[in-house]
Image (tube, rainbow, N blue to C red):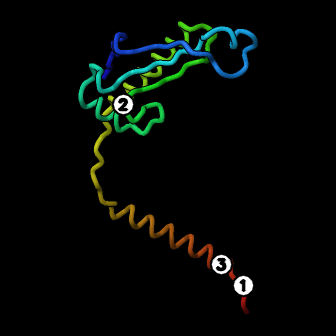
Amino acid sequence: MSLRIDPAEVQFSAIRAQGPGGQNVHKVASAAQLRFDIRASSLPAAVKARLLQWPDARITADGVVVIKAQTHRSLPMNQAEALQRLQELVEAAAHVPRTRRATRPTRGSQQRRLQGKALRAGIKAGRGRVTE
C-alpha cells in the first residue's frame, strides 16, 4: 500500500545545524525541520490512528510529526531527506500486522523437546563429583 503525502500538508522551516562544520554551520541555516499534523492530514483514518498510537519520539502529544534533517550541507537536500523519512514512517504505519492465531505444539515437537531436555540433564548429571 503506497500512500503519497500531500506537500501542502507539510511545513518546513530552516534552522541552524548542530555539530562540526566550520564557518558554514554558524552562518547558514541549512538544517530542515519538517512538521506534519497527523490529525489534519488527508491520510486514511486507520493509518492516522496507527500513527497516533506509534511509540515514536518524533510524534508529539498533539499528533504532530517533527523531523529534523541536517546531514547535508544544502537546505533542499535536507528537506528531501526529511520528506523521505516522513514517507517511510507513514508507510510503516500503513502496514497492517497479521493477527496471531494461537496454535498448539505438535506431539512430535513435544517429544523432541523432552528428549533434548533429558539428554541435557544426563550431561549435567555427569558433571557431579565422582564417588566410588
- The residue pinned by badge 2 equals 63
Residue 103 position within the rendered picture, expressed as x and y whole percent measured from the top left: 29, 56
Task: For marks 2 and 1, give the one nearer the viewer.
Answer: 2
Q: CA distance from mark 2 to mark 3?
A: 61 Å
Q: CA distance from mark 2 to mark 1?
A: 64 Å
Pointer 3 with pointer 1, Cβ within 8 A: no
Q: Quadrant of residue 24?
A: top right
Q: Nearer the viewer, residue 10 or 82?
A: 10
Q: Residue at x 56, y 8 (%)?
A: 75
Q: Secondary structure at mark 1?
A: loop
Q: Residue at x 64, y 10 (%)?
A: 73
- The residue pinned by badge 1 equals 129
Task: For marks 2 and 3, give the one nearer the viewer.
Answer: 2
Decide which of tag 2 and tag 1 comes sooner along the chain: 2
Kindly identify the amino acid type of the residue bearing the numbered disc 1: Arg
Q: Nearer the viewer, residue 130 or 62?
A: 62
- Quick check: 92 left or right of 23? left
Q: Secondary structure at mark 3?
A: loop
Q: Quadrant of residue 14?
A: top right
Q: Residue at x 43, y 23 (%)?
A: 88
